[in-house]
Image: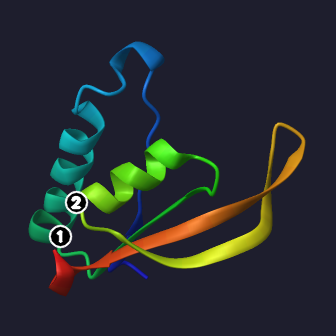
Amino acid sequence: DDSQAEVGFTLMAEHRRQGYGQEALAGLLRHLFLDRGMRRVTATTDERNERAVTLLRAVGMRQEALLRESSFWKGELCSEYLFAMLASEF
């Protein structure tokens, strides 16, 4: 579906907790909704990644689901949160 996008992010440790992630993600959402005409943007994160969850909520994304044991990370079965935002919510 060309009206949907999925975003992801990784920040090096020395650049965390300085607002860069929020600024970059907010700018990306603005671009996707206003310039690219997306209807829906999603993101997933490991349920244990509290900083990512905080960042996704800070830019206005909402948690839609907990996907139990949905992925492997470094050989470990993990559960993920699914976050989303609609253009009408932006």
Viewed as shown, does residue 78 lie left or right of 57? right
State whether residue 61 appears in this view. Answer: yes
Q: Residue at x 9, y 68 (%)?
A: 34
Q: Residue at x 25, y 25 (%)?
A: 18
Which color scheme does this rendered protein use?
A: rainbow
Instruction: State the residue position of label 1.
Output: 33
Tell whether label 1 touches label 2 (CB within 8 Å).
yes
Can you name the residue that lies furthest to the bottom here? 88
Q: Is residue 29 above or below residue 23?
A: below
Image position, residue 17 (x, y; %): 32, 28
Name the mark on residue 62.
Answer: none
Q: Secondary structure at mark 2?
A: helix
Q: Secondary structure at mark 1?
A: helix
- In what quadrant of the picture does the N terminus appear? bottom left
- In what quadrant of the picture does the C terminus appear? bottom left
State whether residue 8 appears in this view. Answer: no
